[in-house]
Image (cartoon, grey):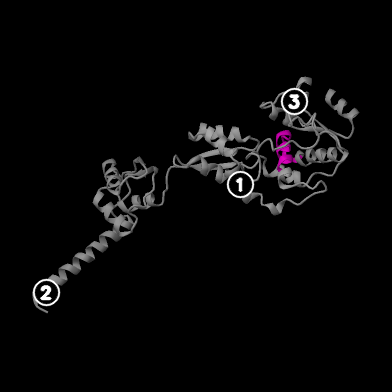
Amino acid sequence: MRKSDKFAWFIATLFVLFVLIFIDQRIAGVFDKHDEKRVMIDIRKGESLSKIAQMLEDSGVIESKEIFKFFAKVTKTEGKLQAGKYQLSKSMNEFKALDKIHKGRVILKPVLITEGLTYKQIASRFKETAGKDSLLIVRLCENKEFLKKNKVNAKNAEGFLFPDTYYISDETSEEEIVGMMLKRFSQELPDSLFKKNEFGFSKYEYIILASMIEKEAKIDSEKPLIAGVYYNRLKKGMLLQCCATVFYAQNRKGGKLTYNDLEFSSPYNTYKNPGLPPTPICSPSLSSVDAALNPAMTKYLFYVSNGDGTHTFTTNYKDHIKAQRD
């Protein structure tokens, strides 16, 4: 090999080595800046790699759009960058910015869905907290084909939207929101949990009862007692007389029932119609479902609120009236 060829080979090798070291140090963060200022970047669907790189350079997140594009091509992530709103830092390098956008680590908003909400109230919560289309969520909850696709064979999604904190982004669709809630329900409450009782209850009927318990009980320790009251009434062929079902029928949050309310015409009026209402009346908690599955074995047939979250339980109407007066 001639000296000139050896020298050229040496220079080429040195250059490749330099590039490899440079890439390694970029990835490792040696060239990270020290400005911790946060920058909000909104990447829309369909935006090109060049446009994204330019946006990042203009905002000061990266120093070189060319290095960013180089990393995207080397890692074969070009065309795989995900849309969304990102919180990035000016201390990031090109590789870290690329990695975050490729993995879709967008800004997530926590949405707390508490127990006892109806699907319409849940839809409103997502609108208020995350700006989602509440009407579309309601429609999805009433769409039998969508529900069937998500393994819910019911009139609507009432009772099957699992209460929890959900983290969603601006790009999370309403379909994904309802889908993830239904999926979480099936994960937490699998079919195997629901054994037929002496009334031959299906999973759906257990959830209906659990939703009634959820709305009637204020403290968890009383939930099995309230469940026991309902089972005892069913055994005797008595009306369940659950106030919460009437409130649901009237689209009310609560209050006091009048005699006119008790005559309200609705299949949900358990003061007039025997047995369970046609659907759940809210999303129950795990403790309410557990109470429906494992009621307390008592002779109680009545309960009345004490005004402090507790109830007085009685076995006959005479004592029930006395408890109401006391």
Nearest the eye: 96 or 241: 241
* Depth check, front residue: 304 or 267: 267
In the structure shown, which secondary structural element does the residue marked by tag 2 occupy? helix
Marks 1 and 2: which is nearer the front?
1
Where is the N terminus found, in terms of image quarters? bottom left
With respect to residue 137, does 32 lie above or below? below
> Residue 5: which numbered mark, if any?
2
Q: What element carries label 1?
A: helix
Q: Earlier in the sequence, mark 3 or mark 1?
A: 1
Mark 1 neighbour density, 10 Å: few (under 14) some (14–19) many (20 or more): few
Vertical comparison of 276 with 183: above or below = above
Residues at marks 3 and 1, CA–CA distance in whole angstroms: 30 Å
- What kind of secondary structure does the magenta stretch mostly adopt? helix
Q: In the figure, 214 relative to 193: above or below? A: above
Percent coordinates x, y for residue 122 in the rendering = 58, 35
Residue 294 in picture, x, y percent from top left: 77, 47
Query: Are the residues flagged by discs 1 and 2 in contact, CB closer than 8 Å?
Result: no
Question: What residue sits 84% from the left and 23% below the top?
Answer: 325
- Residue at numbered disc 1: 148
Residue 313, by quadrant, is top right
Where is residue 30? Give x, y as percent.
30, 55
The disc label shown at residue 265, or none: 3
Give the magenta-colored segment's residue range: 207-221
In terms of sequence position, does the residue under pointer 1 or pointer 2 come before the other?
A: 2
Q: Quadrant of residue 20?
A: bottom left
Q: In this view, does 207 lie to the left or right of 34?
A: right
Amino acid identity at mark 1:
Lys
On whether residue 219 falls in the magenta region, the answer is yes
Task: Mark 3 and mark 2 in contact? Answer it, CB < 8 Å.
Answer: no
Position in image of residue 40 (x %, y %): 36, 39
